[in-house]
Every structure is written in C-alpha cells, then in structure tokens.
Image: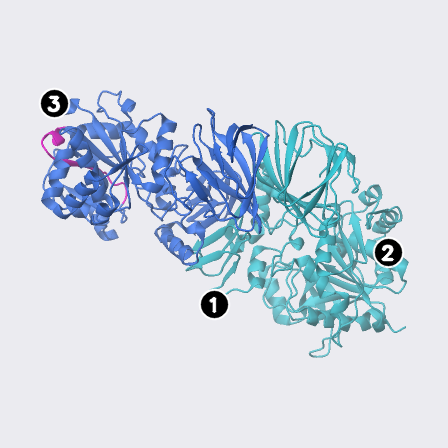
Chain colours: A cyan, B blue
Amino acid sequence: MKITDVSIVPVLLSGGSGTRLWPLSRKSYPKQFAPLLGDLTLFQQAALRFAPDASQAGASPAFSAPLVVTGSDFRFIVVEQLAELGIDPGAVIIEPEGRNTAPAILTAAFYLMARDPDAIMLVAPSDHAIPDALAFREAVGRGLPAVEKGRIVTFGITPDRAETGYGYVELGARPAASEGPVDLVRFVEKPDSARAEAMCASGNFLWNAGIFLARAADMVEAFRLHAPDVVDPVAEALKKATADLGFLRLAPEEYARVPSISVDYAVMEKADNLAVVPFSAGWSDLGGWDAVWREQGADADGVALTGPAEAIGCTDTLLRAESDAQVLVGIGLDNIVAVAMPDAVLVAPKDRAQDVKLAVELLKKRGRAQAETLPRDYRPWGWYETLVLGPRFQVKRIVVHPGAALSLQSHHHRAEHWIVVEGTAKVTIDDTTQLVTENQSVYIPLGAVHRMENPGKVPMVLIEVQTGTYLGEDDIIRYEDVYARGQGAKG
Amino acid sequence: MKITDVSIVPVLLSGGSGTRLWPLSRKSYPKQFAPLLGDLTLFQQAALRFAPDASQAGASPAFSAPLVVTGSDFRFIVVEQLAELGIDPGAVIIEPEGRNTAPAILTAAFYLMARDPDAIMLVAPSDHAIPDALAFREAVGRGLPAVEKGRIVTFGITPDRAETGYGYVELGARPAASEGPVDLVRFVEKPDSARAEAMCASGNFLWNAGIFLARAADMVEAFRLHAPDVVDPVAEALKKATADLGFLRLAPEEYARVPSISVDYAVMEKADNLAVVPFSAGWSDLGGWDAVWREQGADADGVALTGPAEAIGCTDTLLRAESDAQVLVGIGLDNIVAVAMPDAVLVAPKDRAQDVKLAVELLKKRGRAQAETLPRDYRPWGWYETLVLGPRFQVKRIVVHPGAALSLQSHHHRAEHWIVVEGTAKVTIDDTTQLVTENQSVYIPLGAVHRMENPGKVPMVLIEVQTGTYLGEDDIIRYEDVYARGQGAKG
C-alpha cells in the first residue's frame, strides 16, 4: 500500500486554556470553543479544515474522522460542536489534567498505532487561524512523501513581518521556489527584534506553527529515542484508561506522573528526521488580541469591529462587542483593543496585548469569577446561566439537549419554580412524573426529589426561579446521574 | 420683615437630559438621577444641599421645601428620590416639554410670587457637583443683602484652570478679598484658550455657574423688561396648569408656544441689576467625563476608579464599572475614559469627552435603544427590567413600591407566570383576588383581566415569565389606572 493512498487522522489538540484572549477566552471555556473569527468556533474551523468530506480536491489528501484530545470539562463541548457540523469524532480522549503538548501527542500516537500500525497522524492545535483550508490540505499532501520515508513533517509559515512572538525553524538547502518538504536544520526560540529582522531577511527561516504530520509509529519511535521518560507513564495511562459515555478517559494517577513538557522541547528540537513543508497562505496562532486584530481584517483606518461595535474617528483599533445586547463605542482611539462582554470588559493598547494575562491574574487575586468562568455554564446535558441573583432568590435560564437528563436530586435550602418556555420537559417530583410543555410550570418544594429531562427532539428551554436562604450550586444531593457525577459536584 | 429672616425656596431644575455623560446618562434617565459621584444621585445631593434642616450653621440661611421643575417622564423619579431622603417637595411642576432654562425659571418665579409676594428663590441646576454644601449655603447667605436691594445674585466660581468649556462673568471693582456681592460687569461666552488664560490671570473673571438668587418678583420683573415674549405664554401655561396626582402639569399647548431659550440669553446678559457672589470651595457642571474624572478624585497616577474596575499601569484615566456584575480592566492606558454598563460601553480619550454626544447621535441613527434608554424602565409604581428576551418568551424582574398598583389590564398575545420572590403581591385575575407571597406563583392566562398590587410595607419583587407570539409593551388593554394612562401606553 502506497502511503499516499491511506487517509490521515487529524489529531485535534483542544485541552488548552490560554488567558491572553480574556475576557472572551476563560479557563471554563477557552478560546478554541468561541466564535473568535466568523460564525464557527476555532475548534469547529479546525475540525472542518480536515473533515473527511473536505478532501474532494485532487491535490488534497484524504482524512479520517478526527481524534480529539481534550480536558474533562470540555468533553461535552467538543461533542456538541462536532455534532453541529455533522462530524462524528473517531475518538475523544480525555486528559485528567493538561500536561502540555508532548504527552497529548504521544497518547494519540499510541492510540492510533494500536488500531493501525501504518496510521498517519496530523497533529494540529485547534485554536489557530488558517483562512485557506484547501491550501493547507494541499500542503499536508505535499508532506506525505517525506512521511513515507519515515520523517516527521512540520509546517513552516512564510513570515510576513519580523514577529518576535513566534519561534522559527531554519531550513536546509532547497531548490528555488520548492514547495516540497525541506530538511529542518534547527529550531530557533522566540527572537529579539533584530534577530527576527535578520531571519526574515534571509528567507531561510519560517515560523514554527506547531503542526506535525507523521506515521504514528514514527512519532512513538521519536519519543522512545528523545523523551523516554514520557513513554512509560503515557502508555500506562492509556492502558488503564476507562471508557466513559463514549469518551476514553486516561487513568488519572498514571497521567499525573507524566512530565508536563512541550513536544518541541521533548522531541522535535532533538530529532534528526524532521522535514519542513513551507506554507505561505496565511496562519496565526491567535496568541493575543493584536493577532486577532490582524486576522480579523481591518478597514482602511486599521479599524476592526465585531458585533454591535462602533468606531468614531479611530485608527488601528479593535472593538469587539461579544453580545448582541451590548453596544461598544470607541471615539478617537488609536492602537487600542476593547473587548466588551456583559460581565467583563477589557481595554488596552494593542501593543500591550500580551499583558492581558496580568488582568486575569489580578482578577483571580480579587476573587472575581470573571477571571476564569463565563456566566454560561456548560454541562453534559446542556447549559445554564444566572439571569439575576437576589438576596433570597435566583433566576436561571436552563437549556437541555434533546434526550438529555439532569441528575435525580434534591436541595436542603431552596424551592424551585420551573416554567417551560420552549420544548417539552419530563419532570419527576418524588413519585410522580409528568410532561410539562411550553407555557406550563411546576413547583419543586424544598426537599423534594426531582429530575428534569428533555424527551423531545428539540432543545428544551426552561426558566428556573429559586427561592431560599442558600442558593449555592453545592446544595445538591444526587441520587442517580447518567453522567456519573457525585454529591455537591457540578450539575 | 428683614429679608435675611425669611427662608429661601430652592428651585431645582431637573428637566435636562444631556448626552455627554452617555452611557450612564440617557434621555430616559438623565445624569442628575444617577449616583455619578458617591452613593446619592446628583439630584439628591442638590436637594440635600438646600434641605430645610441643612441650615443649622449660623452663617447659613434657612431654606423652605424645594420646588422642582422637571419633565413628565421624571416626575415619579423625583418624588421617589426625595422620599428616600425624607424631603417633602413644596411643589413639583411638570414641563410638558423642555424649553431650556428661561421658561422653567419664570414659571417657578410666577408660582412662588403668587403664594408669597416676598418669596426668595434660589435657582439651581440639579446636575452640578458642589462638594462643600455648607460653604455654598454660606455663600447664598452672603448674597441676601444684595437681594434685599432688588438685585439678582449669581454665583461666580473662582477658576482653578483656564477652562474653555465654561462661560465667565466679569466682576466690577471690589475691595480686596471681598466675599460679598460684587457688581457684575458682563457675561463672557466660552473663550478660546488664550482668552481663558488671560481672564484667569486677571483675577477679575469667574466661571458662570448658572445659579441665581433673587426675589421671585424681581425675577419676574427682569423677564418683563428683557424677555417680554416669554412672559405671557408662561403665565398662560401656569394659569391653565392642571393638578395631577400631586404634580402641577403646565398646559401643553400654551407651553409649546413659549420660546426655547436660556436664562442667560433671555435675561441675564441684558439685566443691569446683577451682582456676583464669588465662590471658591469647588464646583463643577459635570459637563463631560473629563469633568467627572476631575471631580471624582484620582490617585497619584491620575487614575480614578468606580465599581469593580481595575487599572494596571494606567495614568490619567477614568475607569467606571457601573454594575457590580461587570468588571472593567484597563491595561497601560493613558488619558482614557472607559465607562462600562451591561448594555453599553464607551471608550474615548479624556480630551475627546465632548464628542460623546456623537456616539449618542450615531447609535440613534443605528436605531439602537441604548442611545436613549436604560434597560431598567421606571414607572409610577416602581420599575422593571428585561432579564432575557427569547423568540417566544420574555423574563422580567418587576419591583413594585409599597402601596403601589399596576393598572387593571389584559393582553391579547401573551400569558404570564408571576413568581413572587420578595414581599407580598395582591393579585386580581378576572373576578378573583388573592395574596401571593414569597415563593408562591400565579398564572395569568392569555386574555385574563388582571392587576398586580403591593399591599405591604416593603418593596415587592416579582419574576414575570411571559410566553406568547408577540411580547411588545403595547399589547395592553387598560381598564383602570390610578396613574391615568391610556391604551397601549407605558405600563
């Protein structure tokens, strides 16, 4: 079997939770799951880029269903966002905790190799922007001959500016205008600006995009050679992994023993079988609001707007109103980033974009929930958000996916009124089960054992009005839970 | 009777609706009614400044209950904000439409003169900041001897900078360090900066604060002399005014014929019986966010914060988070104003503060409600706000004052669920009346005639969940209304 005939498994790395795109990106809902550019989320764009049916074009290789490596908190978001695209994941592997890229990639390699000794993997972060998906798929295709020779192929982005925020890769000798794989001489850490200028001028240095194409077996072999301490604990964590509602959950104790290390440090900077495929059709790691401004596309004045944002006499400015219910107006601003959400607003000069992490640290110190969580809380069964929190009452909007169910539960300190406003709920209160449909309500007395399900084919939306002396999420006694969660745990 | 023994009637002008403090100040709820500086609103601070029991200090004159001139939309806000302070207004006169300051002042003068030929009025805008109330009351006291001589006394603010945003008054000759009334030579329009510098250097020019002390009869006489075209229509509008729930509502047709003109243009710039009392203890018209920054008090870096706002490495910057539920973070900002509200955010350089009106104009053009209205809607009986608006449902929080009642009404297109979360409601549905208390709910079927009242002594808070095909405020048939409103009018 010639290797270019086989299909490639996209390995989407989705465990990250960067703070540099706060307030849009939060630990509870990181940037890859947000519609940062366009209507789809970055994760969805990454999944579509390598979707099985996206490969009609001749020069583009075939892709299999994606393997997603993500965190426990995000597993249902992953499934939901793929379902919206009609993409069925080949597997969703859950890391009990994030250990940087090397363990995630090795886990995927082991997993794929066990199922197909010849499997080829394309390791791709899911929070990057690559506007021209077809061009990138073609670049992937150009990497296959090198993969056939046992190389690990990385993708090098032709720089369009002397960026100091990225690492670089140095290319070996290549035919003029070659687009094929070229030997990789070495990795260069993020440079100062003089060094960046020099590298860009030479034409022999490309940005390191952190995307890798290789046989799974070759990837494992590279780890065995260069990062042997990662190999055994990852193998153990995978061996003892448990299947959980269709997810593969790595064994927590074993995974906790895996060194937390990036694949660049662990393997790539040491390996001597690397090749680079140059790519010049546009790429960004969206590592800050300045990068978002650049990718989003500004007008002649350098102004980029999202949502109900208005710029009056502004230049080189990014104004993002993330909610339709909130207008953002900038007047006379130059080189400013302003991002408005109903619970949090950021304003900073564009060239201070990397300091946004300071805002997150400060808000954490202040004990502000906005540092890490969004008002909307995603759960296995759907999501909810608090609409108003009073001294002895709380109003929530709750959305339950078709077929999903909340746990059978009771509360010590609060009673609840439920009013269904869309769809139909199946409600169990103590020994009684009833259907509650649009414009109907039920009352859950304090202490009553109750459950809410959506038996229908459309999302069910319900308004919950809680009254009581204590309204914390941890006032919950759980009796049965299809999602196997415990007492006082989330949702 | 010696004039210094009589008490002075504060005339609080509260009809204005400036746009320069958007988004805090909106047409539906202008800045004087907002807690712009401190816990009290500017209107409350103005009322307290001249409150009857604020005059204990020896040098301070006595004040009567205030006369408030305001717009129809604000009449219940005026009463509510005074009630919070325990101040009983002497009268609340409602202008059917704003006609600038001259007609409002003449109306008050006529009104007071009719009740007491010797009445003395202190005309004060209610949206200014005067931090030292006692010092200002003493300055008012110093004006009384001039009033006794038939003068109109204005107050001139000792400039602390060459401000180009204010008009000035030129003083006549005065004894060194005199604090008493001095002849006013002339008014000077807002100057350019060279002229402002020169005036400040001379020491003979003070800012025109737009505050006037005079016998009501002398004020009327000044209008007769200098603005006779204002006199008759104002007199007619007052003569045909109607009493309405304790308010005095000027006759709309007559008032519409009154020229819209400021008291400075109409009278003061022409009168020759003016005196000035200098005042140097601090004053601002809060005419823009730059003025708010100045008055609010900045730290050593020039940073002023309100609410959950955080400044990281900022200088000369105002960051205001107007809601406890929304954090605002500024990083590395210089000379910036950022004001965040859950429905609207403004960011601008401080020296562009006067251009905020452009934002309001643009948002109006875009048809954005945020240009002129707040999410919270104030009504005679209390207020409400929309918590969430869905395709076929809407959730509102409704707060009803003790003793207040909504109109008896019905809707064609929606049913309502009411859940009481604080206090007790008296609910009428068709022929049945019941008490509904905390943690209880009622259902109002589509078409049912219903009313909500608060029979208790504390505010009643209720969550309303509407479902239906049309949820506009104008789907209302009103049967009885203690506030005398009509079909489809605001609820």
Q: Which mark is residue A300?
A: 1
Residue B171 in the magenta stretch? The answer is no
Chain name for mark 1: A
Looking at the picture, how far across and down is residue A220, in whole percent? 86, 58
Q: In this rendering, does residue B300 appear at all?
A: no
Looking at the picture, how far across and down is residue A473, in whole percent? 67, 34
Element carrying mark 1: loop
Q: Residue at x 40, y 49 (%)?
A: B372
Res A142 quadrant in image:
bottom right
Chain name for mark 3: B
Number of other residues with Cα within 10 Å of mark 1, as a class: few under 14, some 14 to 19, many 20 or more: few
Q: Residue at x 38, y 55 (%)?
A: B361
Q: Residue at x 48, y 52 (%)?
A: A327
Label 3 or label 1, whichever lies nearer to me, is: 3
Q: Amino acid at mark 2?
A: Phe
Q: Which mark is residue B28?
A: none
Q: Amino acid at mark 1?
A: Ala
Q: Which residue is mark 3?
A: B2
Q: Are marks 2 and 1 on the same chain?
A: yes
User: How much space separates mark 3 and mark 2, taking CA atoms?
Assistant: 101 Å
In the displayed structure, A427 sits above or below B258; it is: above
Chain name for mark 2: A
Element carrying mark 2: helix
Looking at the picture, how far across and down is residue B185, in whole percent? 12, 43
User: How much space separates mark 3 and mark 1, taking CA atoms?
Assistant: 71 Å
Element carrying mark 3: loop
Q: Are marks 3 and 1 on the same chain?
A: no
Q: Amino acid at mark 3?
A: Lys
In the displayed structure, A292 sits above or below B476; it is: below
Which region is colored magenta? B145-161
Apparent side of residue A187 relative to residue B420 in the rendered image (left or right): right
In the displayed structure, B80 sits above or below B311; it is: above
